[in-house]
Image (spheres, rainbow, N blue to C red):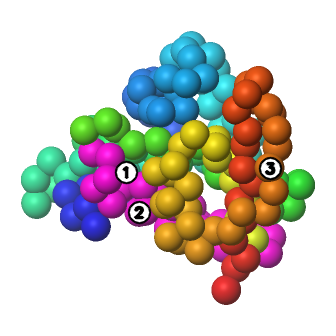
Amino acid sequence: MADDCFIAIGSEDDIIDCSRIACNSEIGIKYEFTQEAISKAMLASIAQSGMLILARENRNSETKKSTASRILGFAWIEPKGAFGQAPYLKLIAVAEQRRSSGIGSMLLQEFEESTRNIGRAWFLLVSDFNERAISLYERHGYEKAGILRSFARDGIDEIIMYKRHE
């Protein structure tokens, strides 16, 4: 697990950095995200009930919880975004140089922990081409529940995945 970072709740001030990470992610590149569009969507989301969970870099061992530290990844959550009653993981993205370092797992675990008292299961969509993300979710106990054919883009299917609360 990544011990050189910590989890924090994000705010409007973090949206620009999160949008950069999102645009440079596999899905961001494939779907041609723009910083302006993703920032606007995140802002609208957190103005309602959406949340950003951040993985922040520890600058040094004495000031581990510095809020000014660099964002290494984030999870964008809609607490009741799945069918109006269950937590929905809208997007999870990790800075390119920190992928496969455990940050995605940390963010996924925090998503589950912070929404454990909402609904009976967690939901997400993952694009069929994003095999690393599918593998991450399966390792954490998520199951494939269905496919939305050409849902967001023609020729790209979205896999519905869910995990029941234990």
Residue designated by label 1: 55
SS for callout 1: strand
Q: For residue 25, which numbered disc appears in the image?
A: none
Q: Can residue 143 be spotted in the picture?
A: yes
Q: Which residue is mark 3?
A: 147
What residue do we see at 32% from left, 46% from top? 99
Give the amino acid at mark 1: Ala
Quadrant hosting residue 1: bottom left
Tell me which segment is drawn in magenta. 98-120
| Residue at the disc numbered 2 | 106
Residue type (three-letter) at the residue carrying disc 3: Ile
In the rendered structure, which disc, 3 or 1, sits on the residue that comes first in sequence?
1
SS type, badge 3: strand
Q: Are marks 3 and 2 in contact (CB under 8 Å)?
A: no
Q: Nearer the viewer, residue 129 or 31?
A: 129
Name the image quarter holding residue 146: bottom right
Which of 108 and 53 lies nearest the eye of the viewer?
108
User: Could you give the CA–CA distance between mark 3 and mark 1, rounded to whole angstroms?
Assistant: 30 Å
